[in-house]
Image: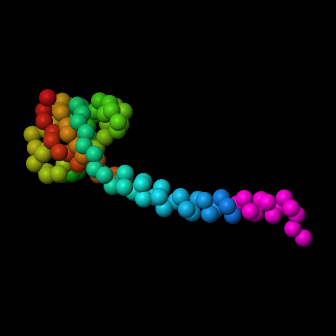
Amino acid sequence: MWHPSRVRLRSRLLALAIAVAAVAPAVLTTASTVAAKDVTYKTHGVVQSFGKDKKYVNIAHEDIPGYMMAMTMSFDPRAPAQLEGLAPGDKVNVTFTVSGDKRWLETITKD
């Protein structure tokens, strides 16, 4: 036999499940819309190293307000020519775009 407290608990759990199911699509849509938007930032830093065949560059950069605290990160060039003439230790100004989990260099110039 069902105890009254079990019936109330099951009713509450069912109501909660219905509420979550109703809200979940809106939350998922909002999250995927935000994640899909590309954002561009600027920073200043020092070239630390390059990936094999200069497929990417590691830059120790300053704080990037609204994105990342100061740290060393890798950046993928949009074109290999962007990294020509750069060497570890070079101070650089960088403009990059965040697209999903990638960071694409828009511009990189020696300081």
Left of 60 or right of it: where is 89? left
Residue at 87% x, 68% y is 2
Judge whether residue 18 is colored magenta: no
- Most common secondary structure along the magenta stretch: helix
Whether residue 31 appears in this view of the structure is: yes
Quadrant position of residue 85: top left
In this figure, which colouring scheme has been used for the structure?
rainbow
Specify start and end residues of the magenta stretch as a single range.
1-13
The spot of residue 14 in percent (x, y) is 69, 64
Left of 34 or right of it: where is 81? left
Q: Nearer the viewer, residue 111 or 31?
A: 31
Residue at 31% x, 40% y is 73
Q: Decide: is 47 above or below 3.
A: above
Left of 68 or right of it: where is 93? left
Residue at 31% x, 33% y is 64
Q: Nearer the viewer, residue 64 or 78?
A: 64
Residue at 23% x, 36% y is 42
The spot of residue 58 in percent (x, y) is 26, 41
Whether residue 57 appears in this view of the structure is: no
* Image quarter in which the C terminus is found: top left
Q: Nearer the viewer, residue 13 or 89?
A: 13
Q: Decide: is 21 above or below 80.
A: below
The spot of residue 46 in percent (x, y) is 23, 32
The spot of residue 101 in percent (x, y) is 34, 52
* Image quarter in which the N terminus is found: bottom right
